[in-house]
Amino acid sequence: MFAIPLTEDAELRPLEVWQAAEFFIHIERAREHLNRWIGFADACPDLASARAMLQRYADRQAADSGRIFGIWYRGTLVGGCMFPHFDDQSGTCEIGVWTEPAGQGHGLITAAVGHLLDHALIERGMARAEWHCDPENERSWAVAKRMGMTAEGTFRSSHVRRGKRHDMQLWGILRDEWIAHREAEK
């Protein structure tokens, strides 16, 4: 299996179905933290549903319409990133991330997102990448901002999470903007 170093102590690797038990243990540690911002943990209340989620992403990978990766810090799965939406025909994708508190503050999400943006916008030649987040989730939109994305608007009352309506902020970056951002960072 391949691994992309993120820091001296961390790496980005594919998150696959055979890792469902490790994934579920991680979700259990992160559940309350994640549920504050996204429905990701609620979608995995048990090992079978965690395995099913990883299988859905394996199916998306086979169809070239999505993919999921884990972030391991000092040998422990502490978060990840994904392409929940990847449409080669339209040239657009969405990047999503999550982490438990042990994975915060090390630059892991920012480094992982850089690899996903490189893959989508440079290697695959997509025109646009999107980032969706709760406008109150400052840590999330701060990553989008660090990556050179532009805040494009807020979808008010766009979805229900845990019985309450929430807004969703949309950030985006175009291929040429990402290339310029990378060059400026060198």
Image: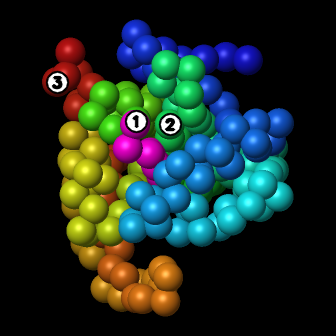
Disc assigned to residue 70: none
Q: Nearer the viewer, mark 3 or mark 1?
A: 1
Residue where numbered disc 1 is placed? 103
Q: Is residue 122 left or right of residue 43?
A: left
Label 1 close to label 2 by CB (< 8 Å): yes
Instruction: Give SS at disc 3.
Output: helix
Q: Position of residue 163 (x, y in %)?
A: 49, 89
Residue type beneath disc 1: Gly
Instruction: Tell me how many marks there are.
Output: 3
Q: Position of residue 80 (x, y in %)?
A: 52, 40
Q: Earlier in the sequence, mark 1 or mark 2?
A: 2
Q: Earlier in the sequence, mark 3 or mark 1?
A: 1
Residue type beneath disc 2: Val
Q: Is residue 103 left or right of residue 146?
A: right
Residue type beneath disc 3: Ala
- Specify start and end residues of the magenta stretch as a single range: 95-102
Residue where numbered disc 3 is placed? 184
Q: Position of residue 161 (x, y in %)?
A: 48, 80
In reply to whether residue 96 is colored magenta, the answer given is: yes
Q: CA distance from mark 3 to mark 1?
A: 27 Å
Rendered residue at 57%/33% (across/down): 77
Rendered residue at 68%/49% (across/down): 24
Work out which residue is located at the far left of the displayed protein and give it: 184
Instruction: Give SS at disc 2.
Output: strand
Q: Is residue 132 above or below residue 72?
A: below
Task: Determine crowd level at label 2: few under 14, some 14-19, many 20+ residues with C-alpha closer than 10 A.
Answer: many
Rendered residue at 76%/43% (across/down): 20
Q: CA distance from mark 1 to mark 2?
A: 5 Å
Q: Quadrant of the C terminus?
A: top left
Q: Earlier in the sequence, mark 2 or mark 3?
A: 2
Residue where numbered disc 2 is placed? 78
